[in-house]
Image: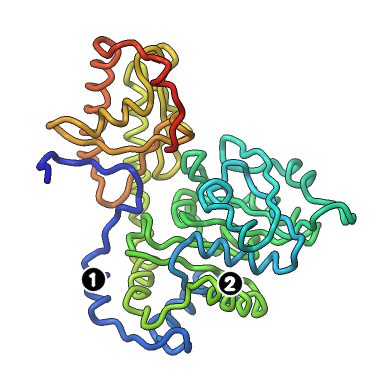
Amino acid sequence: MSNTPTVELRSDTFTQPTSEMRRAMAEAECGDDVWGLDPTVNAFQKEAAEKFGFHSALYLPTATMSNLVAMLVHCEKRGSEIILGDKAHMHIYEQGGYSTIAGAHCRTVPNQPDGTLRLEDVEFAIRPFESHYPITRAVCVENTHNMCGGRVLGKDYLESLGALCKKYDVKLHIDGSRIFNAAVKLGISVKELTEQADSVTLCLSKGLSAPLGALLLTRTEADAVLAHRFRKVLGGNMRQVGVVACCGRIAINEMVDRLAEDHQNAKMLAEGLASIDGVACNVEAVETNMVRWGLDKKVGDRVTCAKLVEALASGDDVSVKMICIERGAAIRAVTHRHITSDDITKAITKVRKVMETAVTTWPKLTAADHILTIE
């Protein structure tokens, strides 16, 4: 095992449970949650529903399952259609489960650079009721938006989108895996931020540091009953799950305010990257804990994002780990509670060092270097 120090910026999913979470796991009061008898889960779900201002909250193993359950609820009738962004995590990274499992058709509209969907695009995409078309049942947005670099969808925008959905009797689902990052950035509560939504997914195992788990918030008793049924058929029912649900309670109560530190470190990283010759980074677009960056065209004859990511992770001084996204067109870095300002300084220094070497000594690229690979 290498002794090289590592700055782990690939994802906030690398966070470890806190000491308080580990103690809570050892002491959690448990019961059979399939029977509704786990007191820790029951208390957590009730508390979360109250915090978000929803009728119910359902604890699930993952946010992907939560999103899928939400679409099964909203698209229970066959021939349904979902409208979502072309850069949505639900569209790109969740295996098309909405079609293969929920039996729903997905219609994409362009995500804008700030993560939003233009209201006119959404309205145009909503189908008129006509025998040739699927029936539009749900509009899905992502907040914060991963592929757009952690951008925040604001309260005013969501109010306008919510009004549009109500006009056409279409459900609004928010993939809010990082919804607390958005709320912290805006300085408002998640209740205020999600009041237009019919359902919301929250991931507990990213910046909030729980070892696993997600929540699906639903507005009505009928939707809550359906969500519970669909969790079962997807294999998401768990038994004495209070042993990890206890970490979720700590996550939503103790780990939210500190997300501002992650946002500050991301901004620091973006500013440092933008100062490096040959690097392209839009500092103003960094709103939360993600930095999407890439390469200036002037270095395109010697450096690719994939080669740069490989070089950053190598060497004996420090291993800086990031990932290529968009099939190698850009690089993503994600800050979290294990990343300090000193780590950010080390990362900036490593990028500067590698770039200086790359533009002067790396050989010219060949056709093979430009082959697109899965990120």
For label 2, the SS is loop
2 or 1: tag closer to the N-terminus: 1
CA–CA distance in space, label 2 to label 1 = 29 Å
**Label 1, on which residue?**
22
Numbered label attached to residue 330: none
Q: Is residue 169 above or below residue 1?
A: below
Residue at x-position 58% and y-position 67%: 69
Crowd tier of the residue under label 1, counting other residues whose Cα lies within 10 Å: few below 14, some 14–19, many 20 or above: some
Amino acid tagged 1 = Arg
Residue at x-position 32% and y-position 37%: 322
Crowd tier of the residue under label 2, counting other residues whose Cα lies within 10 Å: few below 14, some 14–19, many 20 or above: many
In this view, the residue in front, 295 or 340, is 295
Left or right: residue 357 versus residue 90 is: left
Left or right: residue 281 versus residue 124 is: left
Q: Is residue 210 above or below residue 321?
A: below
For label 1, the SS is helix
| Quarter of the image where one finds residue 227 | bottom right
**Label 2, on which residue?**
54
Residue at x-position 55% and y-position 74%: 233
Q: Position of residue 351 (x, y in %)?
A: 27, 26
Q: Position of residue 258 (x, y in %)?
A: 33, 55
Question: Image quadrant for the C terminus?
Answer: top left
In this view, the residue in front, 8 or 21, is 8
List the single residue furthest toward the left. Answer: 3
Left or right: residue 141 versus residue 276 is: right
Q: Position of residue 103 (x, y in %)?
A: 68, 61
Amino acid tagged 2 = Phe
